[in-house]
Amino acid sequence: MLSEPRAGRLAAWGNALIAHMVSPDDAAIAIVGEDAVHRVEGLPGETAPVGLTLALGRLRALGASGLRVALPAPGHPLGLSGPPEFNARALEAEEAVICEGAALGLVPEVYEAGPEGDVHVEVVWHCLPVREAPPADVPSLGEAERELAEALRDATEVLTRLDVAGSGPVAEAAVAAYRARVDGAARSASMRGCGRATGGRGREVLAPGYPPRAVRVLELAQRVGMLVSLASENGHGGAVSASEMVARGEALRPVERVARRAQVAAYNSVVVERGMR
């Protein structure tokens, strides 16, 4: 997943709210981001969809002690713990949030409305029961960081061998920028004092309360995802035969999986730390 998942924003800022590090209104504004509005449907005690501020407060009252992210893909139920009905909805959306301590989960449904050039996005989070069990295939931050280091090397080798940069000047410039920036991004992230660090485009990478290592892992995971997307979206590159294209897909599939695992580890890190205290 290349772009920041909505589940990531909801979990990160919801966790900051639970830790009393941000106000409900600030958390809701950060979660909505560039969307028009977010609502939560199916919340216990509510007969109609409610706004994020009310929903976050209600989840805390229902016992939610932390929010975890799931980023599942076909054949890889990353971060899910059941039941099957919830897993199916989360897999269709490719993301979900699980409320620790409340046995509830949230799955987004995205609607676009408005004329061309003035489209606005509305999101409805469907609140459903979940099974309280360990999530599937979620690594620790340390494991994720080690896996990412290997994935960075593997992704660069694959792109170079298959001449993805040769598919056009834009792709070539993107790969060059990636190679030049990734080490510097990792170093700068490691020196930041809190999880509210900003990325190269000025956006907030995570919410207050997250450790610097989580920021570093999330930034690197998103850049690995960028490389995988670049390889997938720029035609054949140097892989002119069908067998070479299949080989490229097979080589990059585990790299994409590592990037998703690392994103989940970063977003869930504060919940894991709280559980270890």
Image (cartoon, grey):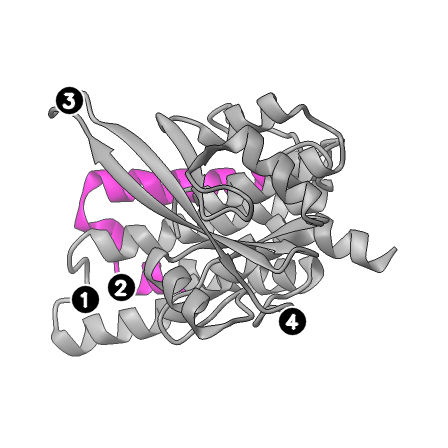
Q: Quadrant of residue 158?
A: bottom left
Q: Residues within 10 Å of mark 3 (few under 14, many from 20)?
A: few
The residue lying at 51 percent from left, 32 percent from top is: 52
Residue 233 vertical position relative to residue 60 in the rendered view, above or below: below
Residue bearing mark 1: 239
Residue bearing mark 4: 133
Is disc 1 in contact with disc 4, using a CB cutoff of under 8 Å?
Answer: no
Residue bearing mark 3: 117
Residue closest to the eye, 271 or 187:
271
Magenta residues, start to end: 157-185
The question of residue 12 being in magenta is answered with no
Which one is in front in this view, the residue at disc 4 or the one at disc 2?
4
Q: Amino acid at mark 4?
A: Ala
The residue lying furthest to the bottom in this view is 243
Is disc 2 in contact with disc 1, using a CB cutoff of under 8 Å?
Answer: yes
Q: CA distance from mark 4 to mark 2?
A: 42 Å
Which one is in front in this view, the residue at disc 3 or the one at disc 4?
4
